[in-house]
Amino acid sequence: MTLLVCRFLFSIFVLNESLGLIFPAAAEESYTIRDIGLLVTGGTVEDLTNNGQIVGTAPLSLTRSHGWWFDGKKNIDLGACGGVGCRIMGINSKSQVVGNIGRDAFIYSDGKFVDISIFAKPPGMALAVNNAAFVVGWYTLIPHLEGNSTAPSERHAFLYRGRRLTDLGTLGGKESVATDINNREQVVGYSSTYRDETHAFLYMQDRMIDLGTLGGTESRANSINDLGKVVGSATVAGSNRQHAFFYSDGKMSDLGSLDGQESTALDINQSGYIVGMSGSRGFLYKDGRMLDLNLLLSPKSDWKSVSPCCINDGNQIAGIGISHDDKSHIVLLDPTQ
């Protein structure tokens, strides 16, 4: 195992005025990296639980894929999940898994795959699940008409709970996608607007709220924690370049980027720690600073880079690590302090 070396410089607390968050003033977290296993070309790491379980997808061909699941001890190949192909997109603390089989959204619970396509018309995708087994994603509202492949299809964000599906609607446009749900049943995602732009949304109390942008025309929300804090990406004024954002109490804040590159925030935990990508580099955002994960690797490390996907409440980070032989691995970064 290799070590990401860093030390806390102070133990006092400071206020990050731009985000309204209070963190201990500190330098980089200290991490060790666990190699969970090889990841085939095109494979993905999608989600991480608080007890270190990880899920993702490994493609077999252009049209078929297998879901995989690291249960904290070993990798489990879920295969095609009983269908023609399987993608795993999310997991909750009860080891309930969601994704799609072929064209159908599903939830996997207690050893059984439950097809929810009777509620969420295919093609569709389940993208996230909370601890109450409420599922969000997208489904096809108006499919392609048979014999008329040029007819536009429409997809809408959905919330599935207790064998009941709620269409979350849109921000005035034709399409929407729900990307995450917290344990307070708040949902985030993105939707087209009546101006044919794409904006991040927060759905709560039966209402879809437009989170706006950073001055540009586009934004997407990727994650929400149980405190209702949202992260994603949005275009900035003038250049229309994409920057990671943090949204809280009605305000969207620009998290910036590494060396002027574009950036996107992918996940946020309950402490407000954020992971994402800036250009081709992964970052950890904490204490009001965006830290380059690649620069935190030990000079003697066998890892060239780490691209994070998610962070849990224990500050563990899951993602894809590139080893010295240029192969992709599933990795789990464990804080040592």
Image (cartoon, rainbow, N blue to C red):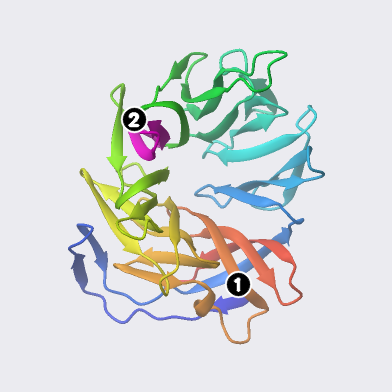
Q: Kindly indicate the quadrant of the structure image that contains residue 280.
A: bottom right
Q: Residue at 33% of width from left, 35% of height from top?
A: 202
Q: Kindly indicate the quadrant of the structure image that contains residue 36.
A: bottom right
Q: Residue at 44% of width from left, 19% of height from top?
A: 167
Classed neighbour count for the residue bearing mark 2: other residues with Cα under 10 Å, few (<14), some (14–19), many (≥20): some
Give the magenta part as a residue range: 182-203
Disc 1 secondary structure class? strand
Residue 233 lies in the magenta stretch: no
Quadrant (top left/top right/bottom left/bottom right) for the N terminus: bottom right
Q: Identify which residue, 228 or 208, lies in the foreground.
A: 208
Q: Position of residue 248 (x, y in %)?
A: 25, 47
Q: Position of residue 276 (x, y in %)?
A: 47, 59
Mark 1–mark 2 distance (CA, rounded to whole Å): 35 Å
Q: Which residue is mark 1?
A: 305
Q: Earlier in the sequence, mark 1 or mark 2?
A: 2
Q: Position of residue 192 (x, y in %)?
A: 41, 33
Label of residue 327 in the image: none
Q: Is residue 315 visible?
A: no
Disc 2 secondary structure class? strand
Q: Position of residue 204 (x, y in %)?
A: 31, 28
Q: Kindly indicate the quadrant of the structure image that contains residue 118.
A: top right
- Please identify the residue farthest to the bottom as the structure is shown: 299
Q: Which residue is mark 2?
A: 203
